[in-house]
């Protein structure tokens, strides 16, 4: 692909970031826009924390914690320990360096900037050349309803509760009123290609897709929209996507993923272990492309990016 291609990726957190790390070995960061889920955003200690925005930004800046895939590298937790003396034992691990981001974001939002503007500032200051775009400036708050329990805010379900329990429903609170951030729809319709990262279809990409106009924008450019299945061999590569698919009545397979994205994507990349689903995915009007989708190393993520870019091209 030439140097003039522009790629827009719809992203959640760690799974998406791993792919993006490979992608930017193949295309210049300045040709990339990442539209990021903010349904996981939460307030801790009065600070606005945007986990997926930070995961993507830190990854592009080369400062992400390589072990967890979220938070910053070379992190310490002194402030959190001290906060524990006031608030009780913490369950959400905010490191000292990471806290600087949340302090800055919160202060800039309070001074009147939008989340889009603050995110741009943070990315610039960390040396990121790609455009990291929050899906919306408006608050969308994902809740997860487990059997026999009231809906939990996402981070309470995911981190505090260890993503355990039978998922009955996902609520994207505020999404009907939320508008896509300025630039989101254009980034989808004007890009050379759009990639749906191998993120959770319900809680990572779900909030982006549920915003007014996003599905329509994708469907108009469908032939150049490529998704990567987050389900491999009947399981999610990471996180609770498999449990959510099962709980919400979907087949836990790339074909189940294809059905969720039907009419939005032209191509689905599925892992070689799932090659037997190819024909039935094709019958859904989606071109199946078989690849090794397990991104064990940055080099493997870059090879997956090659496959995705080739699919956009052809
Ligand atoms: N994930 C965890 O599993 N445990 C944590 O303590 C945790 C802290 C954390 C702090 C900052 C941040 O940006 C992300 C953090 N994450 C943590 C990841 C985050 O909860 C999830 O990866 C996303 O929300 C889902 O994409």
Image (tube, rainbow, N blue to C red):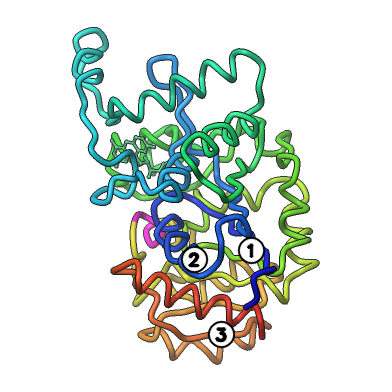
Q: CA distance from mark 1 to mark 3?
A: 20 Å
Question: Compared with residue 211, is residue 41 higher up or lower down, i.e. above or below?
Answer: above
Residue 23: mark in rendering: 2
In the image, the segment drawn in magenta is: 239-243
- Is the residue marked by circle 3 packed among few (<14), some (14-19), or many (20+) residues within 10 Å? many
Q: Main secondary structure of the magenta part?
A: helix
Residue 290 locus on image (x, y percent): 47, 86
Residue 241 on the magenta span:
yes
Which residue is label 1 attached to?
A: 7
Question: Compared with residue 226, is residue 118 higher up or lower down, i.e. above or below?
Answer: above
Question: Compared with residue 25, is residue 233 higher up or lower down, i.e. above or below?
Answer: below
Residue 302 locus on image (x, y percent): 43, 72
Which residue is label 3 attached to?
A: 288
Snapshot quadrant of residue 296: bottom left
Element type at marker 1?
strand
Q: CA distance from mark 2 to mark 1?
A: 10 Å
Whether the residues at callouts 3 and 2 have beta carbons within 8 Å, the answer is no
For ligand 1, give the image quadrant: top left
Element type at marker 2?
helix
**Closer to the camera in the image, 131 or 95:** 131
For this view, does 293 lie left or right of residue 286?
A: left
Residue at figure coordinates x 78%, y 61% from the top left? 190
Element type at marker 3?
strand
Q: Quadrant of the N terminus?
A: bottom right
Residue at figure coordinates x 71%, y 39% from the top left? 181
Snapshot quadrant of residue 45: top left
Snapshot quadrant of residue 236: bottom left
Residue at figure coordinates x 34%, y 45% from the top left? 64
Residue 236: mark in rendering: none
Residue 57 on the magenta span:
no
Whether the residues at callouts 2 and 1 have beta carbons within 8 Å, the answer is yes
Q: CA distance from mark 3 to mark 2?
A: 20 Å
């Amino acid at each position: 692909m030439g140097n003039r291609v522009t790629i827009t990726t719809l992203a959640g957190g760690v799974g998406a970031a791993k792919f993006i790390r490979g992608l930017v070995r193949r295309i210049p960061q300045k040709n990339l826009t990442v539209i990021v889920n903010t349904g996981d955003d939460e307030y801790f200690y009065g600070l606005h924390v945007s986990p997926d925005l930070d995961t993507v930004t830190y990854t592009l800046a080369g400062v992400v914690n390589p072990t967890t895939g979220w938070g910053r590298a070379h992190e310490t937790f002194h402030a959190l320990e001290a906060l524990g003396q006031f608030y009780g034992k913490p369950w959400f691990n905010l490191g000292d360096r990471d806290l600087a981001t949340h302090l800055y974001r919160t202060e800039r939002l309070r001074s009147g900037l939008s989340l889009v503007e603050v995110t741009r500032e943070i990315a610039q200051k960390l040396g990121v050349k790609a455009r990291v775009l929050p899906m919306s400036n408006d608050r969308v708050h994902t809740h997860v309803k487990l059997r026999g329990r009231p809906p939990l805010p996402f981070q309470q379900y995911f981190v505090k509760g260890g993503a355990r329990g039978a998922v009955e429903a996902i609520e994207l609170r505020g999404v009907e009123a939320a508008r896509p951030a300025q630039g989101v729809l254009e980034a989808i319709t004007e890009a050379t290609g759009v990639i749906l990262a191998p993120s959770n279809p319900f809680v990572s990409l779900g909030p982006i897709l549920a915003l007014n106009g996003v599905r329509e924008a994708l469907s108009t450019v469908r032939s150049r929209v490529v998704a990567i299945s987050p389900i491999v061999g009947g399981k999610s590569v990471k996180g609770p996507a498999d449990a959510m698919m099962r709980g919400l009545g979907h087949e836990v397979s790339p074909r189940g993923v294809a059905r969720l994205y039907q009419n939005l994507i032209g191509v689905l990349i599925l892992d070689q272990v799932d090659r037997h689903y190819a024909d039935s995915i094709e019958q859904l009007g989606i071109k199946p492309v078989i690849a090794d989708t397990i991104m064990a190393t940055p080099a493997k993520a870059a090879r997956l990016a090659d496959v995705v870019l080739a699919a956009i091209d052809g």
